[in-house]
Image: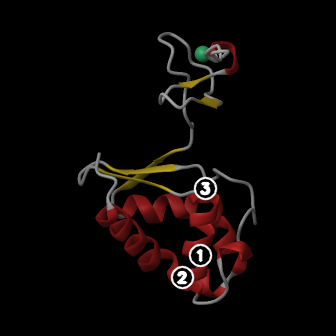
């Protein structure tokens, strides 16, 4: 999967084309977009694109589309990781599908939600948290 700037450019073009007008004129539509970006991974299988937004980056995109304010105006403006039907349909129209499941523990056979991220690049559930080395 390609996660470079062209993936984001294409993703944001899609958002602006199908949802931009509503996001500029309707604050609820802007909050819905924040929910659909924060902690969600979006994929374009044909182009092999993958994009994801932090809470802050999601707010920044909304401020940019509305042409006013900054990311802080939209930071935590709604629950994260909820994609409305309308947004799902608009994005799918251009080939984007989403994954809202989040990261899974990297231990083989374990399907618990990952909550710990180690410096070595591991992600684990609480039950598989690697023992911290004591010095
Ligand atoms: Zn686990």
Neighbour class for label 2 at 10 Å: few (<14), some, many (≥20)? Answer: some
How far apart are the alpha carbons under marks 3 and 1?
12 Å
Q: Nearer the viewer, residue 131 or 62?
A: 131
Q: Which residue is mark 3?
A: 38
Q: Which residue is mark 1?
A: 62
- Left/right placement of residue 84 relative to residue 126 reads left
Q: Earlier in the sequence, mark 3 or mark 1?
A: 3
Q: Is residue 84 visible?
A: no
**Front one among 73 and 11:** 73
Give ligand 1's quarter of the image: top right
Q: Position of residue 88 (x, y in %)?
A: 50, 57
Q: Please indicate whether residue 44 sits to the left or right of residue 30 in the image.
A: left
Residue found 56% across the figure and 43% down from its top: 100
Secondary structure of residue under mark 3: loop
Q: Are marks 2 and 1 in contact (CB under 8 Å)?
A: yes
CB at mark 2 closer than 8 A to ligand 1? no
Q: Marks 3 and 2: CB-CB under 8 Å? A: no
The residue singled out by tag 2 in the image is: 65
Q: Tell me the residue at 57%/65% (across/down).
A: 57
Up/down of 8 relative to 122, above or below: below
């Amino acid at each position: 999967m390609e996660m470079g700037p062209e993936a984001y450019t294409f993703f944001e073009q899609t958002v602006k084309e199908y949802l931009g007008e509503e996001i500029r004129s309707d604050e609820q539509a802007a909050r819905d977009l924040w929910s659909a970006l924060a902690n969600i991974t979006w994929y374009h299988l044909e182009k092999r694109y993958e994009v994801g937004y932090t809470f802050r980056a999601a707010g920044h995109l909304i401020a940019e589309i509305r042409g006013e304010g900054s990311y802080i105006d939209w930071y935590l403006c709604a629950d994260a990781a909820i994609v409305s039907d309308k947004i799902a349909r608009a994005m799918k129209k251009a080939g984007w599908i989403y994954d809202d499941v989040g990261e899974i523990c990297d231990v083989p056979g374990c399907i618990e939600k990952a909550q710990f991220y180690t410096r070595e690049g591991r992600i684990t559930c609480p039950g598989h948290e690697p023992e911290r080395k004591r010095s």
